[in-house]
Image: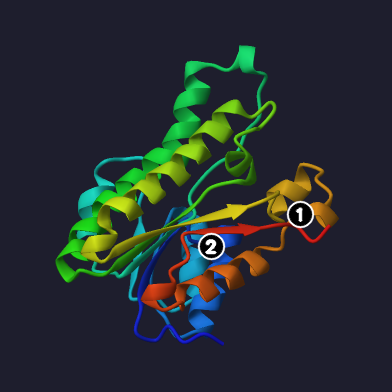
């Protein structure tokens, strides 16, 4: 088991399937956690996992930036996001806003919140969750989703290139298929073709423990089919 006892990690989307699996890995590795989420799912995560801070925030709201700046962390793992499909010609302005607000704006606000402290301490890691469609730059009936998740990857990797000389690094996780969640099962997806969130979480924990001169910038995890 990796040892993250010296790390303080902010985990957004706390209570979601992926975040819960990651939180379990972080807890097992001894990391200090700051849990960020909303409502009942956040409360369940806070009951299950010890945390130095529990923040109920809507990361779509710019006001969340100031709340995050009051918390000092050395790692941000951002799992907030949404998925939807629509025919390209039927996509609306509301569809666009909802997709980019959930997948990109939340990440932007989270980074703006944690980055000042990371730069002051000259140490930090920002991890965003993209998607297999974004890695392939193709997503039939999911153009907005694919574009928003590609933006996540480009943003994080650009941050890495800009800030690595100042001690702040970036990392992108690409689940190369649907994640096995209750919502995806309810939608009728075949669980045999989905990725176990525990496997994604173990990949994240492994990447977090690499030495500085062996930093991993991109992780692609495929379903075992």
Residue found 42% across the figure and 35% down from its top: 101
In percent of width and height, residue 204 lies at: 53, 68
Q: Secondary structure at mark 2?
A: helix
Which residue in the protein does label 1 denote?
A: 194
Mark carried by residue 90: none
* One can see residue 58 in this view: no
Q: Is residue 63 above or below residue 31?
A: above
Residue found 44% across the figure and 53% down from its top: 38
In percent of width and height, residue 109 lies at: 31, 46
> Which residue reaches farthest top?
89
Closest to the observer: 152 or 162? 162
Relative side of 110 to 96, left or right: left
In percent of width and height, residue 126 lies at: 37, 59
Label 2 to label 1: alpha-carbon separation: 16 Å
Q: Is residue 4 above or below residue 87?
A: below
Residue found 52% across the figure and 85% down from its top: 2
Closest to the observer: 91 or 150? 150
Quarter of the image where the N terminus is located: bottom right
Q: Please rate how many residues cluster around mark 2, counting C-alpha atoms within 10 Å: few if below 14, some from 14 to 19, many from 20.
A: many
Quarter of the image where the C terminus is located: bottom right
Q: Would you identify the image quadrant in which residue 62 lies?
A: top left
Relative side of 112 to 211, left or right: left
> Which residue reaches farthest front?
213
Closest to the observer: 166 or 110? 166
* One can see residue 185 in this view: yes
Q: Secondary structure at mark 1?
A: loop
Mark carried by residue 19: 2
Q: Please rate how many residues cluster around mark 1, counting C-alpha atoms within 10 Å: few if below 14, some from 14 to 19, many from 20.
A: many
Closest to the observer: 99 or 168? 168
Q: Would you identify the image quadrant in which residue 100 lies?
A: top left
Residue found 19% across the figure and 62% down from its top: 119
In percent of width and height, residue 104 lies at: 42, 40
């Amino acid at each position: 088991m990796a040892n993250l006892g010296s790390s303080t990690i902010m985990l957004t989307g706390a209570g979601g399937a992926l975040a819960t699996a990651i939180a379990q890995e972080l807890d097992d590795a001894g990391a200090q956690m700051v849990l960020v989420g909303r409502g009942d799912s956040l409360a369940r995560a806070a009951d299950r996992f010890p945390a130095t801070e529990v923040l109920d925030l809507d990361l779509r709201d710019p006001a969340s930036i100031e709340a995050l700046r009051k918390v000092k962390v050395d790692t941000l793992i951002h799992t907030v996001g949404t998925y939807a499909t629509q025919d390209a010609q039927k996509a609306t302005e509301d569809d666009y806003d909802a997709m980019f607000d959930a997948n990109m704006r939340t990440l932007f606000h989270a980074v703006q919140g944690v980055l000042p402290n990371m730069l002051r301490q000259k140490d930090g890691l920002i991890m965003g969750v993209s998607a297999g469609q974004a890695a392939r730059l193709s997503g039939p009936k999911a153009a907005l989703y694919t574009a928003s998740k590609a933006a996540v990857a480009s943003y994080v990797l650009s941050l890495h290139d800009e800030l690595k000389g100042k001690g702040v690094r970036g990392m992108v996780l690409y689940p190369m298929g649907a994640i096995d969640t209750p919502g995806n099962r309810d939608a009728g997806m075949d669980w045999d073709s989905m990725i176990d969130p525990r496997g994604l979480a173990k990949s994240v924990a492994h990447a977090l423990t690499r030495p500085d001169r062996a930093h991993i910038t991109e992780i692609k995890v495929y379903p075992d089919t």
